[in-house]
């Protein structure tokens, strides 16, 4: 081929600077980097991803659940076989078709009373976040507050939508309310408005923090006085000891201040990608009596059209097979996750020395432990840990909004066996010892 022909067929290379700024966001890069490290060091024990434990999938028969849901449509809703097939195989309503089952489960399991009309079934909680932020960001002065460190998915969604974010410290009570109040006032003085604050009050990802009851109540009061919404992410709430869970913010909410984000990924299976959002806020100034859920469903028609009906049928079938409530299933899984957490905490005590700036928290639920080291913890250090010590984890820096250094890492133990946790903690102990020696050496030299 002559050079003119080669030039003619040159691929259309794109400049990163010509693409959306979120693509260069450290959060997106971090996920790629971690996946790449996991691939490169397959023998390393990974405390990195917060995936559900695969032992729960062994006896799972999704076909059985789809049949259960199909039978429900026929028996309870009087659908013919052809109509049932259409429900499962065709495009469907953008708000989803298991809203009634989800609203019922919320009432039984969480004491949250909402109409099915306020529920939208989404492609994971992740899509719910994107839809909610899309709806709330009416203009460039609309800001999201997020209790940090926080789940990268909410920050990523805001970045995709060019929504400004302000960080609020977690503090000892799950949210620093004085800082939140000050952030509202500062935003107002600058001509901006904080539309909502993202919180994960029950065993947050990544910190494991639990918001106490008084702070839950005070947050709702502040939301009233400063006029913002609360985005409540309930992902890890189910891991609480049965009967000891604190009430969801949505349960305490009498003024439609809380938008509740839910997922079936951890309690059922992430492969269905089914989550939901409860948005019972009335939208005034619109035609008819509309709820925010109606608008989110409208937005969804332009994002994913509808959540896969087959996947909804799996979740619907699971709910029906358990009498409409997931409480027993949640309790069974929660006890395994809490056991893993206890294994990890005990193994850390055995294998890692808690001194010279090395410490960690001890959450009573959730998937995560937060460990502090006497050095800056970044991607380069993960690489050392994987290559030299055969153990992986997540640097906490990725859960902040950027421009910070962090001395912390996140350990997740949800999908490991007790033997892997033991071995992993041993390797972590050797890695921490190495870090401590390096630090002492550096201190001696300076
Ligand atoms: C705090 C938190 N929220 C939401 C999600 C996303 O859930 P989904 O799988 O439903 O998109 C996760 C997933 O790990 C999470 O940790």
Image (tube, grey):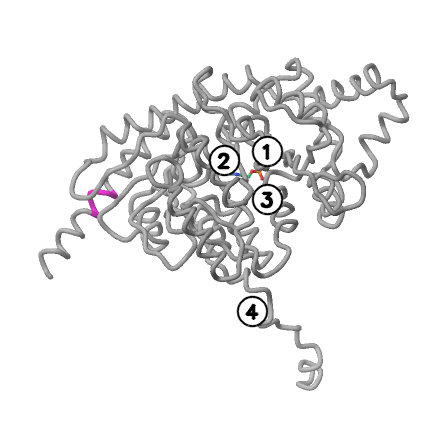
Q: Which residue is mark 2?
A: 220
Question: Which quarter of the figure is the C terminus placed in?
Answer: bottom left
| The stretch drawn in magenta includes residue 433 | yes
Q: Which residue is mark 1?
A: 255
Q: CA distance from mark 2 to mark 1?
A: 9 Å
Mark 4, other Cα within 10 Å: few <14 / some 14–19 / many ≥20: few
The quarter of the displayed image where residue 349 is located = top left
Q: Position of residue 392 (x, y in %)?
A: 37, 43
Q: Main secondary structure of the magenta part?
A: helix
Question: Which quarter of the figure is the N terminus placed in?
Answer: bottom right
Label 2–label 4 contact, CB within 8 A? no
Label 4–label 1 contact, CB within 8 A? no
Label 3–label 2 contact, CB within 8 A? no
- Of mark 4 and mark 1, the one earlier in the sequence is 4
Q: Position of residue 60 (x, y in %)?
A: 62, 22
Q: CA distance from mark 3 to mark 1?
A: 21 Å
Q: Is residue 131 left or right of residue 73?
A: left
Q: Nearer the viewer, mark 3 or mark 2?
A: 2
Q: Which residue is mark 4?
A: 16
| The stretch drawn in magenta includes residue 314 | no
Mark 1, other Cα within 10 Å: few <14 / some 14–19 / many ≥20: few
Q: Nearer the viewer, mark 2 or mark 4?
A: 2
Report if residue 46 is visible in the image: no
Q: Which residue is mark 3?
A: 129
The stretch of residues the image draws in magenta is 431-435
Q: Vertically, is 264 above or below 390?
A: above
Give the quarter the ligand 1 occupies.
top right
């Amino acid at each position: 081929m002559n050079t003119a022909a080669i030039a003619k067929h040159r691929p259309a290379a794109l400049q990163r600077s010509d693409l959306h700024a979120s693509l260069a966001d450290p959060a997106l890069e971090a996920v790629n980097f971690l996946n790449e490290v996991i691939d490169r060091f397959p023998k390393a024990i990974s405390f990195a991803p917060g995936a559900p434990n695969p032992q729960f999938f062994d006896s799972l028969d999704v076909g059985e659940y789809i049949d259960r849901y199909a039978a429900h449509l026929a028996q309870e809703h009087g659908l013919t076989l052809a109509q049932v097939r259409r429900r499962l195989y065709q495009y469907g309503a953008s708000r989803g078709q298991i809203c009634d089952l989800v609203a019922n489960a919320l009432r039984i399991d969480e004491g949250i009373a909402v109409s099915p009309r306020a529920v939208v079934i989404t492609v994971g909680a992740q899509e719910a976040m994107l839809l909610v932020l899309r709806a709330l960001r009416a203009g460039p002065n609309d800001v999201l507050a997020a209790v940090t460190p926080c789940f990268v998915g909410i920050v990523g969604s805001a970045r995709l939508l060019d929504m400004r974010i302000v960080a609020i410290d977690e503090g000892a009570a799950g949210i620093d309310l004085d800082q939140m109040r000050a952030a509202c006032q500062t935003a107002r003085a600058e001509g901006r408005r904080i539309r909502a604050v993202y919180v994960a009050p029950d065993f947050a990802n990544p910190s494991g923090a639990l918001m106490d009851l008084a702070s839950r109540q005070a947050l709702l009061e502040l939301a009233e006085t400063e006029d913002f919404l609360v985005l409540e992410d309930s992902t890890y709430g189910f891991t609480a000891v049965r009967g000891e869970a604190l009430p969801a913010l949505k349960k305490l909410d009498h003024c439609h201040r809380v938008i509740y984000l839910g997922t079936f990924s951890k309690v059922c299976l992430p492969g269905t990608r089914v989550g939901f959002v409860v948005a019972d806020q009335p939208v005034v100034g619109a035609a008819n009596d509309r709820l925010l859920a109606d608008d989110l469903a409208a937005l969804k028609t332009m994002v994913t059209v509808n959540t896969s009906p087959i996947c909804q049928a799996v979740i619907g079938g699971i709910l029906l097979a358990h009498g409409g409530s997931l409480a027993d299933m949640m309790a069974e899984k929660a006890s395994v996750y809490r056991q893993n957490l206890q294994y990890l905490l005990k193994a850390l005590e055995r294998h890692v020395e808690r001194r010279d700036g090395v410490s960690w928290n001890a959450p009573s639920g959730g998937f995560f432990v937060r460990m502090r080291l006497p050095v800056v913890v970044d991607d380069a250090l993960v690489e050392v840990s994987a290559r030299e010590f055969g153990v992986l984890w997540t640097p906490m820096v990725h859960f902040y909004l950027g421009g910070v250094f962090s001395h912390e890492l996140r350990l997740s133990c949800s999908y490991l066996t007790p033997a892997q946790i033991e071995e992993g903690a041993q390797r972590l102990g050797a890695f921490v010892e190495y870090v401590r020696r390096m630090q002492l050496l550096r201190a001696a030299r300076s």
